[in-house]
Amino acid sequence: MIELYNFVSGPLAWVAWAIFILGSAYRLISMYSLARKKDGSSIAYMSWPYGIRSIMRWLIPFGTMGWKVDPLMTVTTFAFHICFILVAVFLSAHVVLWDTAFGVSLWSLPTEAGDIISFIVIAACVVFALRRLFLPHVRSVTRTKDWVALGLVVLPFITGVLAYHQVGPALLMTLLHVLSGELLLALIPFTRLSHALFVVFTRAYMGSEFGGVRHANDW
């Protein structure tokens, strides 16, 4: 088991990073080429002032019309993304990995805070799941790939919490935590989670269209 853990946390981790980086570059380049081929005019009227305005308003809770429509979803979405980044980057165990792998020294969260924030992420994922199950307009557009994306996100947090609280075999839970985290990283460019790569460009496009063409606030 120790040998397997060393492999997963060593060579396999670099494989996951390589897939993520190369896959992200491929998706960004291919989507840009597809946009030029199918709708070149959309690129021509891209306005970065309007695009940046849209992005900045979208980053503020209830700053856009879309955020105001569903307050629960807005609060859940912001809580999820903020807590996700805090745990992924600033959890003490992850800070050690950043330093070991890349020589980057970061401030770390107190251990108890990281535990609480992890539970917030899991709770947010439960809200996302319940929306897909019980809201007709969300359920009607939910596909298997949406559930896969949700599972990819929540699994590293569940296994991380179980490992931290020593529920079950500690080494096995830690191994599953690392594996699920690497799987999440590697599959981001190829699943619904790729919105993390495209969201800036999507908002910039929307801001350019609504601001520069329709002369209205974007959704």
Image (cartoon, rainbow, N blue to C red):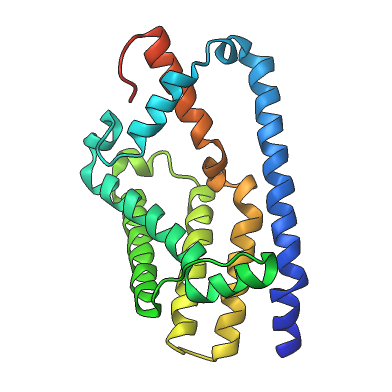
> Considering only vertical position in the picture, is 11 above or below 152?
below
Which quarter of the rendered picture does the N terminus lie within? bottom right
**Residue 47, horizontal then vertical, whole percent:** 49, 16
Q: Give the percent coordinates (x, y) of residue 196.
A: 52, 44
Residue 42, position in %: x, y?
Answer: 55, 13
Residue placed most toward the observer, 27 or 105:
105
The residue sitting at 24% across, 40% down in the picture is 70
Q: Which residue is pictured at 70% across the width and 60% down the height?
A: 16
Residue 52: tell me if it is visible: yes
| Residue 211 rendering spot, x and y as whole percentages | 38, 14
In the rendered structure, the answer to whether residue 137 lies left or right of residue 98 reads left
- Residue displayed at 59% across by 15% down: 43
Number of labels in the image equals 0
Task: Name which quarter of the figure residue 7 lies in.
Answer: bottom right
Does residue 24 lie above or below 169 as drawn? above
| Closest to the observer, 219 or 101 | 101
Asked whether 95 or 18 is in front, the reply is: 95
Vertical position of residue 139 compared to residue 208: above or below: below
Quadrant that contains the C terminus: top left
Residue drawn at (59%, 77%), measured in percent from left and top?
Answer: 176
Question: Can residue 1 be seen in this snapshot?
Answer: no
